[in-house]
Image: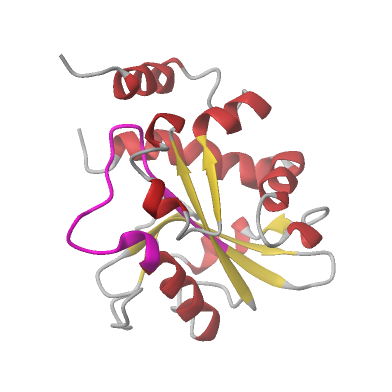
Amino acid sequence: MRYGSIEFMYAEPFANLLATDARFCAWVLHKTKFAAFADGARVLHGEMRQRRSQQSATWWRSHFTEKCRCQGCSGQETDILAIFEAKTGTRFGLHIEVKQPADKFPTNKDQASNYAFRAACWVKSPPASVLRHSDAATVLLYSAAKCNEYATQLAKFGTALTFEEVAAEFPQCYGDNEALAICTLKAASPVT
């Protein structure tokens, strides 16, 4: 299994729905500090795709820079990056960390805090592959089974969404995916 393949199973449907379903996009944005821009905002996925190198298979996955060595950028990536444009023309970004149900936060760095540093850094000086935007927020996408384990990290993200919450509102994202349901159940089951 290639690196991040389970994470990818959770990230891809979320990113695809952001790009294709205006109702989902608005629902997600209403949960962030960008709620005032939610209705009518669109993900600039086509423009983002044009900025990516030919080796990148997606518009959204694994954005990083090695040119900036700040605490947020150095050796780190954003799992899902979505740059939006509101009806007013205002551009803003969501940096989304995806923690598949068996995942843990690293103990050797403060990954949760570093998301906010990176989001702020890229507003001021985005990497060449990232569209300019005037503000950004952070989101943690994770399994409800990890609420207690992630308690200290949750507050470091602007918004926290669970896969279960997303599936309850938008079953087409996770609810109909048997592989995801099996992974979620395995992660939630106690190890014997």
191 to 54, vertically: above or below: above
Magenta residue check for 99: yes
- Indicate the position of residue 76 as horizontal and vertical percent values: 30, 66
Quadrant, the N terminus: top left
Residue 191 image-quadrant placement: top left
- Residue 173: in sight, yes or no? no
Residue 147 image-quadrant placement: top left
Left or right side of 168 for 139: left
| Residue at the image position 28 percent from the left and 33 percent from the top | 102
Quadrant, the C terminus: top left
* Closer to the camera in the image, 54 or 134: 134
Left or right side of 44 for 87: right
Residue 171 image-quadrant placement: top right
79 to 143, vertically: above or below: below
Left or right side of 103 for 33: right
**Secondary structure predominantly adopted by residues drawn in magenta:** loop
Magenta residue check for 185: no
* Closer to the camera in the image, 149 or 132: 149
- Indicate the position of residue 177 as horizontal and vertical percent values: 48, 19
| Magenta segment | 94-113
| Residue at the image position 79 percent from the left and 72 percent from the top | 89
| Residue at the image position 50 percent from the left and 69 percent from the top | 51
- Indicate the position of residue 62 as horizontal and vertical percent values: 37, 57
